[in-house]
Structure formats: structure tokens, C-alpha cells
Image (cartoon, helix red, strand yellow):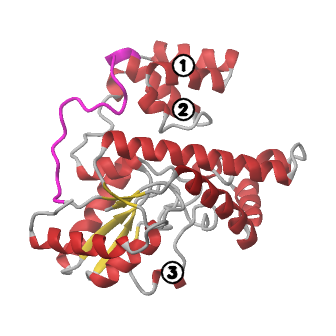
Amino acid sequence: MIVGPTAVGKTALSIELAQKFNGEVINADSMQVYQGLDIGTAKVTVEEAQGIKHHLLDICALDDAYSVARFQVDARQKIDEIIARGKLPIIVGGTGLYVQSLIYDYQLGKKESDVQLGIRKKYEDFEREYGKQALWDMLKERDPLAADTIHLNNVRKVIRALEVFEVTGKSILAPEKEPEKLYDDYLIGLSTERGLLYERINQRVYQMLDQGLLEEAKGLLETHPESPGALGIGYQEFKPYFAGHLSLESVIENIQLHSRRYAKRQLTWFRNRMAPHWFDLVQEPDQVKQIEIAVENWLKGEEIDE
């Protein structure tokens, strides 16, 4: 598995490892499942894929709501199919909750019966009176783990997380028992020096604009403004621009800012909740050789020397 923030080379590494170890790639990015969201999600292109088979890309219509629970089922099925073909599954993405729910036997969606309508109404009334930012701030204070994974615009999920916390006293992401690990995996984490990472993120936004991000966002917000994809970074920032309230320059700055903040949250998630073998291919591209040796040793069942 290959994880890490945006703009650190996950896609390129996945292709290289897939070629070397007869692999197929499974997407673990929550936005790349949506059809038509190609530029803003940095979806792998046909040229970049170099013939390597990719799974769980473009599987979801824009008006559909994909979930962690659905990913868990879909990705495990793909893993079984890839292994049955005698190939190596390579999971690639930056959505930490997707990756974690895949490796471990998290039982998702079990608490709905605990939720009382009165509690839900209380938070709905609060949001109507004080707004979604205040509601999200409340979640951040009570359940920062959930707040890090739920966008403030997704009021329904914010309320759901607050309900669960009030009823159970635990995070909506906290398992009822310690989850069992289901797979023998080798987890690669890619990152680089913070200033350099932010510089690369800023530059990537300009590259996306050159590739047609503005037109992609316009099409999405005109045809599917309520889509979960419309809440994604690189799309939602354009809403005030198309309404005539914000300049394109300000939109670009907002996308860059939100992307940098998201990258920081991604790194925090993987460092605190998982234990990747970290590499920096931005400053030390020759580390690819170390990764290949480590993966080869892992496949042989040998001890990996860190």
C-alpha cells in the first residue's frame, strides 16, 4: 500500500511497483471514485497508467454518495480478484479512513439504532440558528478525530457524528472492540520536507488550471451542485467565483490553502493512526531502489531491515 499527502509521487511509484511486481492498482482516494472528476482529483491518466490495470476509479455517478463501508466491500473484492489472477494488489491513495478500514476489520454502520430523533433535531436546530461553521466547531471540540475527516459543508455527517458521540461517549470512528488486522501488508508512506511539499501543492494547482480545472468545476457545479464531489477541494472554492463574488486569483489562493491544510491532516492521520515505512522520493528519488528491495523482501517473507 502507498499512502501520503497529495503531490509526493504516489501515482508514479505505484506504476513502477506494479510493473516490477506484476501488480494492479486499487484506488483509495474518496474523490477519484466519482465519474468526470479527473483534473481536480489528480486522477491517473491513460498515459501515466502505462497499461497497468486500475480499479475503483470512475465507479460512482456524481449524484451518488460513496461511503467508507462501500469502499471496504469493493476494495476487498478487488483484492481477492487480483490475487486470484496471481497478481499483487497495490492500494494507493490519501484517504486515511479508507485505507485503515480496509486493512482492519472495522464494523461500519452499526450505531444507527442508538440515535434518538430528539438528539438529531437538537443539532439540526442548532445548525439552523448558528450555522454550519459553529456546528462543525462543536464537533471539532468534542470529536476532533471525526472533524478531521468530515467537511463542514457535509452537515448531515457532522450531525451524525455528534449524535453518536452524545449517545455513546465515543467517536463515530472508534471501534467497539480492537479491530482485527485482515491482511499481511507492506505500508509505504511518501512525504517530503513541509516547505517543499507546500510549494509543490501550490504549483500543482496552477498545473490543474492549465489542464482545464475551471471548466471541469463549472460543469460539476452547474449540473450536480449537490454532489458530494462538489464539496471537494478544487471544486467548492469556485462557487463564489461563478456567482461573481470572488476573483479567480482568490479562488486559486483558497484552493492552495485548503490543499495545504488537507495535506497536513493527511500526514497527521498516517503518522498517528498507522505506521508506514516513510520515504522521500521528492528529494531522494533513488530511494525507489530501497522501496523495491523492501517490497521484494516482504514478498519473500524475509525480515525487512529499516
Between the C-alphas of marks 3 and 2, the distance is: 37 Å
The residue shown at (37%, 46%) is 270
**Is disc 1 surrounded by few (<14), some (14 to 19) or many (20+) residues within 10 Å?**
some
Quadrant housing residue 279 = bottom left
Q: Nearer the viewer, mark 3 or mark 1?
A: 3
Q: Quadrant of the C terminus?
A: bottom left
Residue at disc 1, secondary structure: helix
306 to the left or right of 52: left
Amino acid at circle 1: Met
Amino acid at circle 2: Arg
Q: Nearer the viewer, mark 3 or mark 2?
A: 3
Vertical order, 302 against 31 (above or below): below
Mark number, residue 138: 1
52 to the left or right of 233: left
Q: Nearer the viewer, mark 1 or mark 2?
A: 1
**Of 146 and 154, the residue lying toward us:** 146
The residue shown at (19%, 75%) is 296
Residues shaded magenta: 166-184
Residue 14 placement (x, y as % from top left):
38, 72
236 to the left or right of 276: right
Vertical order, 150 against 262 (above or below): above
Can residue 23 be seen at all in this image of the molecule?
yes
Asked if disc 1 and disc 2 are in contact, CB closer than 8 Å, the reply is no
**Of 156 and 305, the residue lying toward us:** 305
Mark number, residue 48: 3
Amino acid at circle 3: Glu
In this figure, which residue is indicated by the disc labeled 2?
156
Residue at disc 3, secondary structure: helix
User: Considering only order in the chain, which callout, 1 or 3, is on the residue closer to the N terminus?
Assistant: 3
